[in-house]
Amino acid sequence: MNILVTGGTGDIGSQTCIALLKAGHKVVVANNLSNSKEETLDKVN
């Protein structure tokens, strides 16, 4: 299933993305990066 995660580079959002990816879902992240960093996506992958 494809899932959109808003705020996916924040603390909770990134952990949510990891859990969804481990469960076999495809994740799309939408974030304005005002309180987080793009490097977080590299760590999630």
Image (cartoon, rainbow, N blue to C red):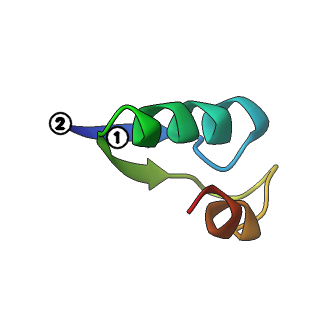
Q: Residue at x 65, y 70 (%)?
A: 42
User: Residue 10's quadrant in the figure?
Assistant: top right
In the rendered structure, find residue 21 and report the number of the disc placed on it.
Answer: none
Q: Residue furthest left?
A: 1
| Measured Cα–Cα span from mark 1 to mark 2 | 10 Å
Answer left or right for 3 relative to 35.
Answer: left
Q: Residue at x 70, y 62 (%)?
A: 43
Tag 1, which secondary structure? Answer: strand
Tag 2, which secondary structure? Answer: loop
- Residue 14 in percent (x, y) is at 65, 42
Marks 1/2 in contact by CB < 8 Å: the verdict is no
Q: Residue at x 72, y 60 (%)?
A: 40
How many numbered marks does the figure carry?
Answer: 2
Answer left or right for 22 relative to 44.
Answer: left
Q: Residue at x 57, y 52 (%)?
A: 31
**Residue behind mark 1:** 4
The residue mark sitting in front, 1 or 2, is: 2
User: Residue 8's quadrant in the figure?
Assistant: top right
- Mark 2 is on which residue type? Met
- Residue 4 in percent (x, y) is at 34, 40
Mark 2 burial class by Cα count in 10 Å: few <14, some 14-19, many 20+: few
- Residue 11 in percent (x, y) is at 77, 36
For the C terminus, which image quadrant? Answer: bottom right
- Mark 1 is on which residue type? Leu
**Residue behind mark 2:** 1
